[in-house]
Amino acid sequence: MAAGDVGSRFAGSEVRGFGNAWIQRVRRCRNLNVVRRPQSRKMSAMHERRWTRQEYDRMTEAGVLTENDRVELIGREILTVTPQKSPHATAVSLANEALRAVLAPNMHVRSQLPLAMGDDSEPEPDVAVIRGSIRDYRDAHPRSALLIIEVSDSTLAFDRRVKGSLYARERVAEYWIINLVESVVEIYRDPTEDSSARFGWSYARPNRVTRTESIPLSFGGVVSAADLLP
């Protein structure tokens, strides 16, 4: 998240649809560092704030959060997105290119754009394959995806346990992690209920695919792991 008090963006102006109490709540939350990295999960209960997706979207509409604020809403928590290093950015571009080459006309690829998941989350996965055309979502974000891909190095544990559980809850049939640490692609399928998981759902044990292997897509087509790994 960009430095500075986001609440100050309200100074000298009125924001339609927001009462003073709500605005002060945003200011207090920013001063308490509610917006944080996924790794920094230890906070006292008095500093915790939980946000609905509706509140999160209203903050964007009101200019409290802008395109410069690299955040996403996960389980009612606003988390900062880890800055991308070159291998991560390369893998995102490779995945976009590989998928666009094999998708049917009634599908499209979104990259690092919001998905509306329940009333508690609005993740922005590195890559998502969405059913329908781009203009189908002019007025609202997609609520799910045929395939979601996260590129992971420092956030590997978070992407496996937290995001994996969220995507399983939303019945995303196929979830891939491009694991830059071990140079493999982790393929997660078959979402099932799991009371021990963060969002009550998880995927079956992943299939780890190396650079020399190919990956059949559940909705048709085949992608080579070599085309995904930088």
Image (cartoon, helix red, strand yellow):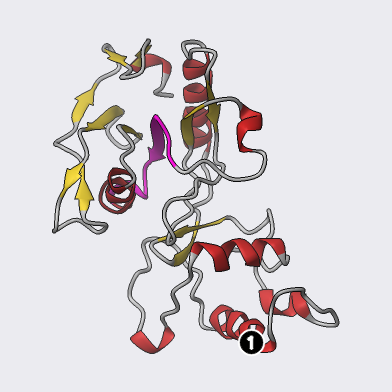
Read off the residue under disc 1.
Answer: 24
Q: Is 153 positioned to the left or the right of 8 in the image?
A: left
Residue 2 in view: no
48 relative to 66, above or below: below
Q: Between residue 170 and residue 71, name the one nearer to us.
A: 170
Based on the displayed image, in which of its 4 quarters is residue 66 positioned?
A: bottom right
Q: Quadrant of the C terminus?
A: top left
Residue 95 appears at what percent x and percent y?
47, 24
Q: Please give the name of the residue rendered at 80% of the width and 82% of the height, measured from the top-left corner.
A: 11
Residue farthest toward the right in the current orientation of the protein: 12
In the rendered structure, which segment of residues is drawn in magenta?
Answer: 144-157
Q: Please give the name of the residue rendered at 76% of the width and 74% of the height, measured from the top-left corner.
A: 9
Q: Quadrant of the N terminus?
A: bottom right
Q: Element under label 1?
A: helix
Residue 187 located within the stretch drawn in magenta: no
Q: Between residue 104 and residue 230, name the one nearer to us.
A: 104
